Image: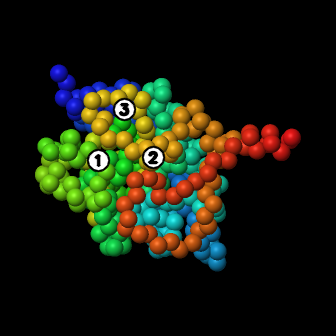
Amino acid sequence: MKSYIQERSDRLFNFSKKFSKIDSLLGKCELPKNIFLDLRSAAQICLYDSLSSYYPNKVFNLDLTLEAFCLFYRNDIIGLPNITPNGLLMPKIETNNSHNLLNKKVYNLIEHLSFSEGSKVACPINLRINFGANTNPEFTSRPRSSTNWHTDIWAGQNCNEAMIHTPICGDYEQSGISVSNPQEGFYPDYVKSIPSFLDGKSVTDKMNENKINFTMKLGESYLLDSFLFHKTSLSSNSIRIIVSFPARLKDKVSSDIYSNPLRDEEFIAISNWSNLGKSLLLASDKSLAKEIWDDTPKDYYAGKFNFLDLNEFFNTTEH
């Protein structure tokens, strides 16, 4: 009889044949250069739109490389109000266009990775910005700070999901992501959402000693099963940026014992993803302004968005 880890591993690597196995619940895929560069360009435009909208009296040079852009405007980026405490750059009215461009470029990545039929991908995708040693200490003390060992299930992700991470900028030697397989005691008792990642300390206390020897590299995508534990390092002074999104797997295994209906509406079929940034647009109705981030754990995406179907819109206006 297969162990639950083996069951999950088999499913994970059947989900996309593009990934080679690093460990049972972790895979990597080298990306075509054009896809990688397109993601970098689209992410930089998202940052540029946020900066130029929030600081209208400043001029930002989009001709800089992404690394130079982040270094030169680091303090301005840190001051953006649409970056959550865990580093998620949120779409706003002023940046809807650039985020739709990013979604369009992410579809090229999704298409390349050739996910199994019937899979769904969350929208919007996550553009995560890590400030390393410059991170606000108040953010790292939050109940669900990503600097603590955790699985995405603890933040409300379903068991039958995998996360795809694509690093596009930064120092992953000093401010990367550490990963570890689940230790004894996690399954089944801690396969659930929990208010604070520290509430699971009894099943993460040995992970620093047993973490997988692994460092992310630019130009690659990584596939992480939802049972894989991870945490963020903040050692470097440089900014790092990751494009990431969860995918919901069609096939179920015996250890899929937790699901969260609050996230169901975030996932759309890959066939619909192909229209994002084209005939289907993601739209935020909130302006770029100072926000107060409370510490209340939320088992759903940090913002609410609408979809505008241009085909329906033009059909309506024609009549």
The residue furthest right is 319
Instruction: Say which residue label 1 marks.
Output: 192
Inter-mark Cα distance, 1 to 2: 14 Å
Q: Secondary structure at mark 1?
A: loop
| Label whose residue precedes the other's in the sequence (3 or 2) | 3
Which mark lies nearer to you, 3 or 2?
A: 2
Q: How is the image coloured?
A: rainbow
Residue at figure coordinates x 22%, y 47% from the top left: 190
Q: Is residue 24 above or below residue 169?
A: above
Q: Which mark is residue 263?
A: 2
Is residue 247 rendered to the left or right of residue 308?
left
Split into 4 quadrants, where in the image is the N terminus? Answer: top left
Q: Secondary structure at mark 3?
A: loop
Instruction: Say which residue label 3 marks.
Output: 19
Is residue 74 rendered to the left or right of residue 196?
right
Q: Is residue 211 above or below residue 144?
A: above
x and y percentages locating residue 194 in the rendered image: 29, 54
Q: Residues within 10 Å of mark 3 (few under 14, many from 20)?
A: many
x and y percentages locating residue 308 in the rendered image: 67, 47
Residue at figure coordinates x 59%, y 61% from the top left: 92
Q: Which mark is residue 301?
A: none
Residue type pointed to by label 1: Lys
x and y percentages locating residue 303 in the rendered image: 51, 58
- Residue 73 in view: no
Inter-mark Cα distance, 3 to 2: 26 Å
